[in-house]
Image: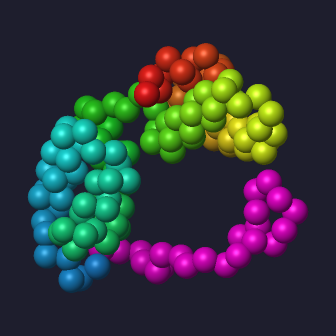
Amino acid sequence: MARMHARKKGKSSSQKPFRTGRPDWIETDRKDIEKMVIDLFNKGYSTSRIGIELRDLHGIPDVKTALGISMYELLKNNGIKMDYPEDIMNLMTKAVRMHRHMTENHTDVHNKRHLQLTEAKIRRLGKYYVRSGVLPEGWAYKLHNAKLIVAD
């Protein structure tokens, strides 16, 4: 895959195996998997952490192949609404941390460029989520709003 912000070819990386259906060796019932996902989310686990827990402790390689729906859809069907998707929240947290660093270190030009690239990723991802209906129409990234949302 090519690099997003550099004019280089990039490095090849591993990919998930192509699988169309539920693996035969998963012995856990669908209802039990759904219950585990909801319980872990209610305990405060992020969706990526839930996936790691299910993979490492319960032998479920992927929630989407095991259930047929994504974890986001599963939570939405059970009445759990996330304010922001996890990937955009992680990027906003990173941007807020970098901006705090920039206020203390004005001459750090490398961090300034990295902050610009991170904010570009946030805006690009925000456009996608507005198009797909996850974020409200007219949502736009602003640093002072991100500081209020993240509040770390």
Find residue 64 and report its image quarter. bottom left
Indicate whether 10 appears above or below 63: below
Per the picture, the main secondary structure of the magenta-coloured stretch is: loop
The mark total stands at: 0
Query: Which sits in the foreground, 139 or 105?
Result: 105
Is residue 35 visible in the rendered image? The answer is yes
- What residue sits 31% from the left and 62% below the top? 52
- What residue sits 50% from the left and 17% below the top? 148
Query: Which sits in the foreground, 144 or 83?
Result: 144
Q: Left or right of 121: which side holds 19?
A: left
Where does the image place residue 29, in percent across and percent down from the top left? 13, 66
Indicate whether 28 appears above or below 112: below
Q: Quadrant of the C terminus?
A: top left
Q: Is residue 8 magenta?
A: yes
Q: Left or right of 30: which side holds 104?
A: right
Q: Is residue 30 magenta?
A: no
Q: Quadrant of the N terminus?
A: bottom right
Where does the image place residue 123, in percent across and percent down from the top left? 69, 34
Q: Left or right of 80: which side holds 144?
A: right
Q: Which residues are magenta?
A: 1-22
Where does the image place residue 142, in percent across and percent down from the top left? 66, 21
Find residue 55 and report its image quarter. bottom left
Colour mode of the rendering: rainbow
Query: Which sits in the foreground, 117 or 136?
Result: 117
- What residue sits 25% from the left and 61% below the top? 53
